[in-house]
C-alpha cells in the first residue's frame, strides 16, 4: 500500500474567527498472486513514505504532502494519498468547508484487488464551532481523528492512513497539520 497524505495546517485566528483543516487521504492498495517466474531473479522494492504535515505560521501556511508510492519493480504500484489544503481563518458569522485530501491514482498490477485510498473528510467551521476532518482509512491503516482545538496532533495510523486535520478556535495561534502513515509491501511465499 502507498503512504497516507498529510493534513494541512490551520491559520491563527482573531476573536471573531475559527479555522479547521481537512484530513489527508489514505494511500492506495493492491494485492497480487504471482509466480516466481513472473518475479524473476530480483525486483526493486520501494515503500512509500507518509505525507508530511502541513505547516502554519500566523495566517500563512502549507497543505499536507502527498504520500509516496509503494512498488515492486514494474509489476505492481500503489500510489500515495494526497494531502489536504491549508485552512484559513473564517469569520464566526459565516461558515467554511476546507477540502480534505483527494485519493491518489488507483493501484495497478494487482490481480486480486486494485483500489484507490479513501479521501480525507473536510474541515468545517460554523459560527464559532469547528470540526477538523478525519484522515482517510485503508485496509491496513486508519486515518487520524480530527483534532479539537486543544487536542494532540492526529497522525495517520498503521500503514497508509491519512493524517487527521486540526482545528483552531477564536483568538488562538496557528497549528501545524499531522503526517500521514507510511506505506508497506508485504510478501508471503507459498508452495
Image: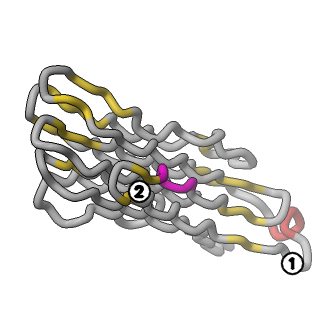
Establish if 49 lies above or below 20.
below
Q: Using the image as rendered, state which of residue 121 and residue 148 is in the foreground.
A: 148
- Whether 181 is among the magenta residues is no
Mark 2 or mark 1: name the one nearer the start of the chain. 1
Which image quarter holds the N terminus? bottom right
Q: Can the viewer see residue 1 in this picture? A: no
- In the rendered view, would you say 120 is above or below 188? above
Q: Residue at x 69, y 56 (%)?
A: 33
Q: Which residue is mark 1?
A: 42
Residue 37, image x, y percentages: 89, 67
Expressed as whole percent of the image width and height from the top left, the position of residue 72 reads 75, 65
x then y, percent, for residue 147: 20, 54
Name which quarter of the figure residue 158 lies in: bottom left
Mark 2–mark 1 distance (CA, rounded to whole Å): 29 Å
Q: Secondary structure at mark 1?
A: loop
Q: Which residues are magenta?
A: 62-66
Please name which of the two marks, 2 or 1, marks the residue nearer to the observer: 2
Which mark, residue 64?
A: none
Magenta-drawn stretch, dominant element (helix, strand or loop): loop
The secondary element bearing badge 2 is classed as: loop
Callout 2 environment at 10 Å: few (<14), some (14 to 19), or many (20+)? many
Q: Is residue 140 above or below residue 115?
A: below
Q: Is residue 23 left or right of residue 132?
A: right
Colour setting: secondary structure
Q: Is residue 160 left or right of residue 137?
A: right
User: To which residue does mark 2 refer?
Assistant: 161
Image side of residue 21 versus residue 4, left or right? left
Q: Position of residue 96 (x, y in %)?
A: 27, 26
In the image, farthest residue toward the bottom: 41
User: In the figure, residue 106 lies in which quadrant?
Assistant: top right
Amino acid at each position: 500500500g502507498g503512504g497516507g497524505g498529510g493534513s494541512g495546517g490551520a491559520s491563527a485566528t482573531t476573536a471573531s474567527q475559527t479555522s479547521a483543516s481537512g484530513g489527508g487521504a489514505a494511500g492506495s492498495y493492491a494485492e497480487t498472486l504471482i509466480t516466481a517466474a513472473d518475479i524473476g531473479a530480483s525486483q526493486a522494492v520501494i515503500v512509500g513514505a507518509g505525507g508530511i504535515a502541513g505547516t502554519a505560521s500566523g495566517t500563512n501556511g502549507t497543505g499536507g504532502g502527498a504520500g509516496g508510492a509503494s512498488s515492486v519493480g514494474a509489476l505492481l504500484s500503489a500510489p500515495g494519498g494526497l494531502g489536504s489544503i491549508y485552512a484559513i481563518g473564517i469569520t464566526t458569522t459565516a461558515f467554511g468547508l476546507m477540502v480534505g485530501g483527494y485519493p491518489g491514482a488507483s493501484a495497478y498490477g494487482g490481480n486480486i484487488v486494485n483500489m484507490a485510498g479513501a479521501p480525507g473528510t473536510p474541515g468545517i467551521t460554523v459560527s464559532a464551532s469547528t470540526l477538523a476532518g478525519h484522515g482517510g482509512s485503508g485496509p491496513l491503516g486508519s486515518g487520524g481523528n480530527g483534532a479539537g482545538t486543544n487536542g494532540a496532533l492526529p497522525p495517520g495510523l498503521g500503514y497508509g492512513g491519512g493524517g487527521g486535520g486540526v482545528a483552531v478556535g477564536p483568538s488562538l495561534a496557528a497549528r501545524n497539520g499531522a503526517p500521514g502513515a507510511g506505506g508497506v509491501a508485504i510478501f508471503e511465499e507459498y508452495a
